[in-house]
Each structure stands twice: as C-alpha cells, then as structure tokens.
C-alpha cells in the first residue's frame, strides 16, 4: 500500500524507485451496498522497488513513514525485504473507503488521503446515459498527509495521481455496464472502452493522462 500512498523523489541513500500498480478489487454487490448508503472499506495491494541501502537511517525513515501512513489509512501489512541485488522490495496491503456522494463532495471526517468515490454523473452527450461515475481521488486529508511526509524528509512527497488497476467483478448477475478511456482492459489497450461486465474485467489506468488527472469509470448498475 506504500505505493498507493507514496512517490519517492529522494530519501537519503535512495538511488531510484520503481512503483507498481495499486490493485483494487470491487464487486457489484459492494457498489450496490454503497449506493444504498453504506461506506465500505475495500482492500487494495501494491508493491514497489526502492533502490536504497537498508541501513539504520533508511529503516528509521521507513518506520516513521509507516506510522504516518497508518494514521491516515488502514494498513494491514507493510513488508520490507532486501532483494538479491541492491535495493528493497516493499509490499503493502490495506483498505480504502468506498463511498457514495450524489454531488461528489467528500466528508471532511474521512482521514484517508485517497478514496474510491461514487457520485452522480452530470456529464452531457454520449456520457449522459450513464447514471454514476467511480473515481480514485484525493480527499481534504491529502495536504496534511503530504505535509507530515515532508516533515520526515523535505524531499519526500506524495503524488496525487497514482496508477491504478481496477478489478471489477459481477457477483450477483447485475446489469453492469461501464464506460472509460485511456485504459488497458484484459490485455488490450483502448482509447475508449464501453462494455458490459458479465463476470469480471481488469482495467489498468496508468501513465499518460493519469500522470495529471484521476481515474474515472462511468457506469450503470441494476
């Protein structure tokens, strides 16, 4: 989950960093529960490689960052191992809130820097046939979270825009139709993608436009 939360520019002996996807699995019945007023915690997992020597200074900073991350989000596993060459492998598992807000507002009580937000779709034109949209988006807690990271190391900052892989699953035979763009879906790249989710689909949304904007999936579900 570290990757969901962090992008390293430098951290003492840091030489380079390779971040992987934030993988998030969402089921159709969970979406329906949220539309009916529940707020759910959705599991995610991620890992990244850190080109750094695992000395006492690096250990101390990683421990402080784990404490900060745990303050703002639910972290179930934070595993740091040295790889066989030079560097560290960090695997993180945790939970992110999935919530519905008709107008897209996010309660200030949400401590997580990022949420999975479902809101009513107000777009016109071809998108108007979709009632809802799902976004991976920052909250009002993001600034405080980023500030605490920089207190650990002024070169350390959290990137608002993270690469995400959505794993959508139709668990209850819903009529579940989606529309999105700039996506890799089940091994193929799509400028736009409109499809029914009959069983399951994986949507990878990273790099390019997603270096400066958040992921959005428009959908209908019944």
Image (cartoon, rainbow, N blue to C red):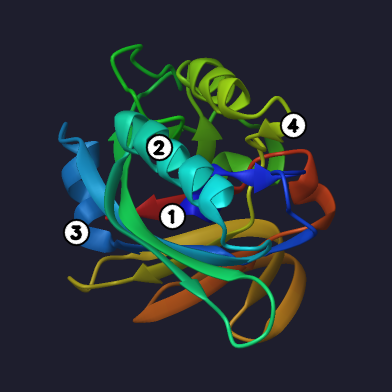
In the rendered image, residue 27, in percent from the top left (x then y), is placed at: 27, 64
Question: Of circles 3 and 2, which is in front?
Answer: 2
Distance from disc 3 to disc 1, alpha carbons, whole Å, reads 24 Å
| Residue annotated with mark 1 | 1
The residue that label 4 is drawn on is 155
| Residue 133 in view here | no
Q: Earlier in the sequence, mark 3 or mark 1?
A: 1
Q: Earlier in the sequence, mark 3 or mark 2?
A: 3
Q: Residues within 10 Å of mark 2 (few under 14, many from 20)?
A: many
Q: Which residue corresponds to the image point at 40% horizontal and 37% vertical from the top-left?
A: 69
Using the image, determine if residue 163 lies above or below residue 134. below
Q: Nearer the viewer, mark 3 or mark 4?
A: 4
Q: CA distance from mark 1 to mark 2?
A: 9 Å
| As drawn, 81 above or below 149 | below
142 and 172: which is toward the camera = 142
Residue 42: image location, x then y, percent = 28, 52
Q: CA distance from mark 3 to mark 2?
A: 29 Å
Label annotation for residue 69? 2
Tell me where residue 51 appears, x and y as whole percent.
Answer: 71, 65
Of the pair 18 and 214, the residue shown nearer to us: 18
Where is residue 213, by image quadrant? Answer: top right
Please give the residue where the numbered disc 3 appears in the rendered image. Answer: 29
User: Dot 2 lies on which element?
Assistant: helix
């Amino acid at each position: 989950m570290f990757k969901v939360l962090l992008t390293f520019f430098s951290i003492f002996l840091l030489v380079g960093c390779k971040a992987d996807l934030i993988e998030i699995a969402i089921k159709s019945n969970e979406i329906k529960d949220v539309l009916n007023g529940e707020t759910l915690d959705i599991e995610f997992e991620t890992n990244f490689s850190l080109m750094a020597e695992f000395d006492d200074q690096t250990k101390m900073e990683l421990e402080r960052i784990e404490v900060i991350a745990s303050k703002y989000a639910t972290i179930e596993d934070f595993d740091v191992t040295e790889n066989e060459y030079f560097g560290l492998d960090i695997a993180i598992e945790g939970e992110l809130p999935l919530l519905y807000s008709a107008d897209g507002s996010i309660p200030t009580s949400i401590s997580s820097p990022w949420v999975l937000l479902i809101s009513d779709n107000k777009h016109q034109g071809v998108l108007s046939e979709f009632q809802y949209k799902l976004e991976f988006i920052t909250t009002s807690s993001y600034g405080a979270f980023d500030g605490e990271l920089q207190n650990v190391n002024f070169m350390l900052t959290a990137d608002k825009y993270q690469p995400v892989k959505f794993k959508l699953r139709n668990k209850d035979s819903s009529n579940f139709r989606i529309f999105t763009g700039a996506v890799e879906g089940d091994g193929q790249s799509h400028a736009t993608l409109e499809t029914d989710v009959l069983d399951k689909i994986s949507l990878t949304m990273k790099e390019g436009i997603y270096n400066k904007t958040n992921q959005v999936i428009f959908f209908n579900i019944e």
